[in-house]
Image (cartoon, rainbow, N blue to C red):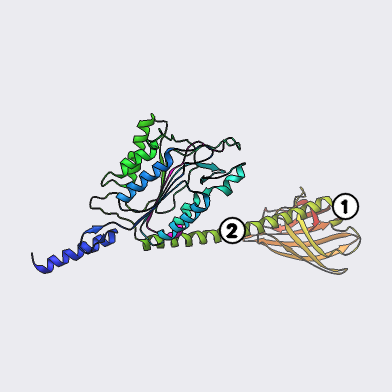
Amino acid sequence: MPRIIQFSIFFMLIASLTVSGVALASDGLPVLERRVALVIGNGTYRAGPLENAPKDAQDMAQALTEVGFQVRLMTDVGREKMITALDDFGRELALGGVGLFYYAGHGVQLKGRNYLVPVGTRVASASDVEFESIDAGRVLGKMEDAGNGLNIVILDACRNNPFASTYRSTDTGLARMDAPTGAIVAYATAPGKVALDGETGQGGVYTRNLLRAIRSPGVPIEEVFKIARIGVMQETGGEQVPWESSSLIGNFSFIGTAGSVIVAPVSTVADGLAQERTRLKEMESYLRTEREALAAQRAEVERSRKEIAALTTQPGNYVPQNEGSIEGSYWLTGPDKRVSEYASILTITGTGDHLAGRIDSPAGARNKVTNLRLENGTLSFDWQGQLDAFWSTSHVEVTPGSDRSAIPVTYRRTGGNYNRGPKTSTGWLIRR
């Protein structure tokens, strides 16, 4: 084979390995992506001690070390040390690579959120859980902030509530948590269910089966948890069913066929997250604008409703009969006295012999008012209206009466091609 072709194939191989996330050592052999893990096992609780949790954490730390993780192991940890460890873990994740958080111990759910219980926690009421324990969402938040390629959360913390005697709760096990993009969250059992702790000294049922699966070469991470689930179900007779929530966008094996791990490049994940944040901000802005427009519409409807209600309850708002000025704006309605959004509006200006009028129609008709006069308390005028090809002329008379609740109106059509022929109808004139 010509030397130039050999070099081309060699560089193409290097490029393909780099894109896949597989680094090359100085001797040209593939090595693992950077892997960091925080492993915590709490068991020495005052209420409900767990014999297997610290051992499970130790066994998990050993297995993860064997498959290339830099592991920080902590057992029987108090709240402050757990918070500090999580902060340190977040800074490690920000350097890139694969992150894994494992917790064995007590965990409880309260108001739909999950809390990891440190050793030494004192809980006298339900509200104490929020302030004395660690919100599991804190772990996911550290991972999301770091923006690294792939994250794994394993919670063997679905045992009985150790504080059941101090406060009443109908919630059991842990609540469901949705994994952020690029992460998988694994539970020892399904949400709302309780996991078995196993025989003392033998390790927890879930972690024991998971350890076997992790040591299986070339198995994708999704299959690892499936193998563990099958083992737990067989061992417990189906009473305990492990469960996962996954939003992984890359491939990962604890032990690859060539010691490899493939993850989405950090830049790709970061770009995707940035685009998603931008989209969410745009959606939030759009929804805020829609809410404001809806609120304005509701306010306008309420204002109109109050105006109409005032017209039907306060006779003084109606047009005066024989006294005072008739200047103002009025609704022209039909015989049912109903003021609708389609009612025409008559506007009168001037006094005495110098009256002028204008009619506005919501439908967009062109209107003209002529011969407007007030004689012996009776208002009359000629109304010419045209909408597209339809037109009509009417003589309108407003005759005051003893009833001040509304002023009767008589419409006498004198011409037009809309409903041909003369016609007389009645209605009402109401002050706006």
Q: Point out residue 124 in the picture as x, y percentages from the top left corner.
A: 62, 41
Q: Foreground: 79 or 335?
A: 79
Q: Foreground: 246 or 168?
A: 168
Q: Point out residue 30 in the picture as x, y percentages from the top left corner.
A: 23, 58
Circle 2 sits in a helix, a strand or a loop, which is it?
helix
Circles 2 and 1, Cβ within 8 Å, touching? The answer is: no
The residue at which mark 1 appears reads as: 404
* Quarter of the figure that contains the N terminus: bottom left
Q: Is residue 426 above or below residue 239?
A: below
Q: Point out residue 374 in the picture as x, y percentages from the top left corner.
A: 86, 63
Rendered residue at 89%/57% (across/down): 321
- The range drawn in magenta is 144-163
Is residue 116 visible to us here? no
All told, the count of numbered labels is 2
Q: What crowding class fits label 2: few (fewer than 14 Cα within 10 Å), some (14-19), or many (20 or more)?
A: few
Counting residues from the start of the chain, the first of labels 2 and 1 encountered is 2
* Quarter of the figure that contains the C terminus: bottom right
Q: Foreground: 429 or 81?
A: 81
Res. 396 image quadrant: bottom right
What's the amino acid at mark 1? Arg
Q: Point out residue 269 in the picture as x, y percentages from the top left corner.
A: 39, 59
Is residue 195 visible to us here? yes
Rendered residue at 10%/68% (across/down): 3
Q: In 3D space, how far apart are the residues under numbered discs 2 and 1 (Cα atoms)?
A: 43 Å
The residue at which mark 2 appears reads as: 290
What's the amino acid at mark 2? Glu
Q: Is residue 154 magenta?
A: yes
Circle 1 sits in a helix, a strand or a loop, which is it?
loop
Q: Residue furthest left?
A: 1
Side of 292 where 209 appears, left or right: left
